Amino acid sequence: MTADRYGPDFEDLMSTVEFRVSEQAHITVDTEVCRSCTTRACLHACPAKLFVPTADGGILFNYEQCFECGTCYLVCDADGAITWSYPEGGHGVVFRTG
Ligand code: SF4
Ligand code: SF4
């Protein structure tokens, strides 16, 4: 694993995890709320880079490779933009130890 003063790079981070994807999204994003958002904090805060701006001012979000860190929910201050829960049992991120 490589690291610099900003910590491990993204590819290294992703190589240490696997995702047991549930068919049911544990996070949903109301892109209509996002259209009036001025901070777009999620774009910079999500360590898995799962929030992507669209050309029409919305947000494209994919839950499949979520680290379940909760950061997006903390930094988003728009009511109703993000609905967050943990994945159902047996699903979600698995961190490898070796
Ligand atoms: S999820 Fe929250 S922070 Fe991100 S664009 Fe939407 S309203 Fe803004
Ligand atoms: S919980 Fe963490 S990894 Fe998952 S979408 Fe939110 S910020 Fe990204």
Image (spheres, grey):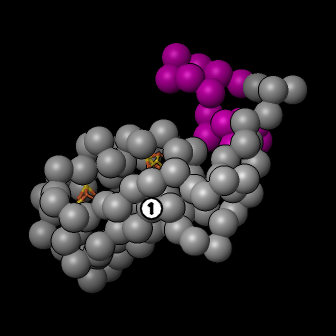
Q: Is residue 5 visible?
A: yes
User: Which residue occupies the foreground of this view, 67 or 58?
Assistant: 67
Task: Tell me if residue 32 comes above or below residue 85 in the rendering.
Answer: below
Residue 26 location (% of width, % of height): 50, 61
Q: Quadrant of residue 56?
A: bottom left
Q: Residue at 66% of width from left, 66% of height from top?
A: 22
User: Which residue occupies the foreground of this view, 68 or 13?
Assistant: 68
Q: Which residues are magenta?
A: 2-16
Q: Residue at 87% of width from left, 26% of height from top?
A: 98
Secondary element under disc 1, as helix, strand or loop, is strand
Q: Residue at 76% of width from left, 48% of height from top?
A: 18
Q: Spot the residue most to the bottom.
A: 56
Residue 27 location (% of width, % of height): 45, 61
Q: The residue under label 1 is which amino acid type?
A: Ile
Q: Tell whether 34 sits left or right of 1.
A: left
The residue tagged 1 is: 27
User: Which residue occupies the foreground of this view, 19 or 54?
Assistant: 19
Residue 43 location (% of width, % of height): 36, 53
Is 50 included in the stretch rendered in magenta? no
Residue 2 location (% of width, % of height): 71, 24
